[in-house]
Image (spheres, coloured by chain):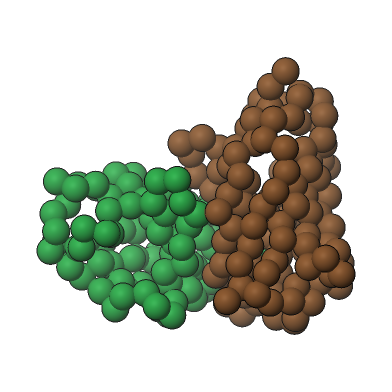
Chain colours: A brown, B green
Amino acid sequence: QVQLQESGPGLVKPSQTLSLTCTVSGGSISSGGYYWSWIRQHPGKGLEWIGYIYYSGSTYYNPSLKSRVTISVDTSKNQFSLKLSSVTAADTAVYYCAREVQQPDAFDIWGQGTMVTVSS
Amino acid sequence: DIQMTQSPSSLSASVGDRVTITCRASQSISSYLNWYQQKPGKAPKLLIYAASSLQSGVPSRFSGSGSGTDFTLTISSLQPEDFATYYCQQSYSTSYSFGQGTKLEIK
């Protein structure tokens, strides 16, 4: 079955760019019918959707983060990636990648999550 | 932006109890409402999609209802593995948003 795995640095310095990659296994990222999302959870808090990408490269971002977010896809590697620029301590969170099923637009498969701390 | 508000924020219950969690949207979202369960240190798990459809593999003691602005998640008979935090999420607006969560604890 399809599995997602996040990877990337666990510590990022303030003002730098956070970069994470999600590797999809057990299925093709290029199969239609799915969006590929990033979601984060601040320590002890709720969930915040960051944005998604379709395998074709079309994207949609949370307006509150749009100016700092870039999500890209590499279909040859079956991966999609997140870049969040100009990070501050407020960006410290567990970052999840997730598969969203179009209609009904629900996140049915999640990665295990990766903790990213922003600190000097 | 669509705001999602859950109540209660926390709830104590016993094994075997029937439990209901409520989610209210700041505007009508039709039936574009999903429910997730999250256990400590784990990723959320999809329970209910489109307000009332049970995700494959989820026990039938979980059910969802509602449309428009008011939704409920019901667990008919609590099991020990059900103690977790539950989140609602709207997918009506592409700027998806989640409720703040309801922590279900053992009484």
Q: Say whether residue A81 is visible.
A: yes
Q: Residue at x 27, y 59 (%)?
A: B81
Q: Pick out the residue farthest to the top.
A: A120
Residue at 25 percent across and 74 percent down: it is: B61
Name which quarter of the figure residue B92 lies in: bottom right
- Report the number of numbered marks: 0
Along the line of sight, the residue nearer the viewer: B103 or A27: A27
Q: Is residue B69 in view?
A: no
Left or right of A15 in this view: A113? left
| Above or below: residue A106 compared with residue A45 | below
* Left or right of B90 on screen, residue B19: left
Where residue B99 appears, x then y in whole percent?
47, 51
What's the residue at 70%, 48% (across, down)?
Answer: A7
Expressed as whole percent of the image width and height from the top left, the position of residue B20 reads 26, 61
Residue B29 point in image, percent of width and height = 54, 68
Q: Residue at x 58, y 49 (%)?
A: A113
B20 shown above or below A11: below
Front in this rendered view, residue A18 or A47: A18
Query: Looking at the picture, how far across and down is residue A8, in whole percent?
Result: 73, 43
A31 vs B12: above or below:
below
